Image (cartoon, grey):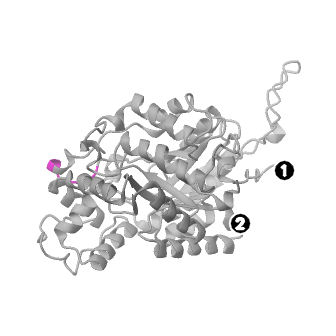
Amino acid sequence: MSNSKSLHLTAFMRPVSLHTGAWRYPGAAAEANFSLEYLKSFIKKLEAAKFDAFFLADHLAVLNMPIDALKRSHTVTSFEPFTLLSALSVITEKIGLAATATTTYDEPFHVARRFASLDHISNGRAAWNIVTTGNPESAKNFGLDEHLQHGERYKRAREFYDVVTGLWDSFADDAFIRDQASGVFFDPEKLHVLNHEGNELKVKGPLNIARPIQGWPVIVQAGQSEPGRQLAAETAEVVFCSPRDLAAAQSLYADIKSRAKAAGRNPDHIKILPAALIILGDTIADARAKRFKLDSLVHYDSAIASLSVALGSDASGFDPDAPLPSHLPETNASKTGREGVLKLAEEENLTVKQLAQRYGGYSGLAFVGTAATIADQMGVWLSNEGADGFTITFPFLPEGLDDVVQQLIPELQRRGIFRTDYEGTTLREHLGLPRPKNRFFT
């Protein structure tokens, strides 16, 4: 099966569902987000279905919302990504293991070492989701009163990427001789000391771990703002994004791939995987009823608090039966997320209450229907350069995940647009990506 004509699918698993009402859905495992046993069962099902990767996002602060709303959220507790993925790596063999690590509130040496370790432990299945951290509350957990400005976060991220990948190249692939007779463990001619001194970072190196099995773990990037798109074009191999419809997806797809080409990269070496909530039913009406039920489980306190987070300003004082105020204060929160709120409100002429209920549940791209109708939609996006695949988020677990692997995946396989088996053992092989050359050694 040709990678260029088949879907790539990753599973977005932190929290196990993005929908606020997921943990309350009838039959849902309310504790799934913080249960190793459930997460082990989920990743085994995903690997059996031949998903490219298990994608674990992360947050460095609880959501900034009133406690009466926060108490209803299943996002307040989750595992630290590397601890969990290391545990899951030993019960799986081929599915990729993607983790988020921030460039704003971490250091390059730590990030490089953790991902190199995960890549070795998993035999070449690690991926780094580069984020600059959108939640301003994170700053207060790292000794700061204010969040770094948006542009500054991306400047640091770009240099951070160069340092991390440089550290991964500290040793040539064949540096470790381990000659017991001579007593020479590694060839010093095949060790590079980075000695990086830049505008944002100063790191000597070398990394005290062998070069990752994949050369570099796969690079994932999630920004959609102007600097985010440029960072993706220059660095990313997988783009996790959230266009609301096919037209927006096609525009984003063309823009990032053209920027990559201008940067001297092969556009085929960037896989664009929009996030998509999948809700399956025996009929379209059945699927829609599931979504209606799911959305109805979101309490208004949580809904209005989620809208406040998305806007970056307190929406609790707005008239719930009126449109959003025309003038909102500027904030230092995610610009892309805020613009998405304003666009959705305008396009669908939503009141504050309607908008809050949408954001209180899940406001992004959703495919709601039967296995056949959703496969139709995915095929259209694939063939019309709206996506190279999707980052699937589940409406509730375990049922929502089981619906996907038991109904949708077989339908995609019957149509020849998703693999029936893995093509290799590393995540790069699953994605059809080349192994990066070591910049310091031929």
x%, y% of residue 106?
48, 47
Crowd tier of the residue under label 1, counting other residues whose Cα lies within 10 Å: few below 14, some 14–19, many 20 or above:
few
- Earlier in the chain: of badge 2 and badge 1, it is 2
In this picture, is 305 found above or below 386? above
Confirm whether residue 200 shows in the render.
no
Give the foreground label among 2 and 1: 2
Q: Are marks 2 and 1 in contact (CB under 8 Å)?
A: no
Q: Measured from the top left, where is residue 84 in percent x and y?
A: 47, 34
Dot 1 amino acid type: Thr
State the SS at label 2: loop
Residue at screen point 50% across, 37% down: 45
Q: Which mark is residue 276?
A: none
Element type at marker 1?
loop
Q: Residue 442: give its label.
A: 1
* x and y, in percent, of residue 261 in the image: 68, 72
Q: Residues within 10 Å of mark 2 (few under 14, many from 20)?
A: few
Q: Nearer the viewer, residue 142 or 259?
A: 259
Q: CA distance from mark 2 to mark 1?
A: 21 Å
Q: Which residue is mark 2?
A: 266
Please say whether residue 202 is one of the residues in the magenta stretch: no
Predominant SS along the magenta part: loop
Q: Residue at x 56, y 37 (%)?
A: 48
Q: Magenta segment range?
A: 63-68
Q: Is residue 45 visible?
A: yes
Three-letter code for the amino acid on which mark 2 is drawn: Asn
Q: Position of residue 328 (x, y in %)?
A: 23, 76
Query: Relative to the observer, which residue lies in front, 344 or 100?
Result: 344
The residue depicted at 43 percent of the width and 58 percent of the height is 276
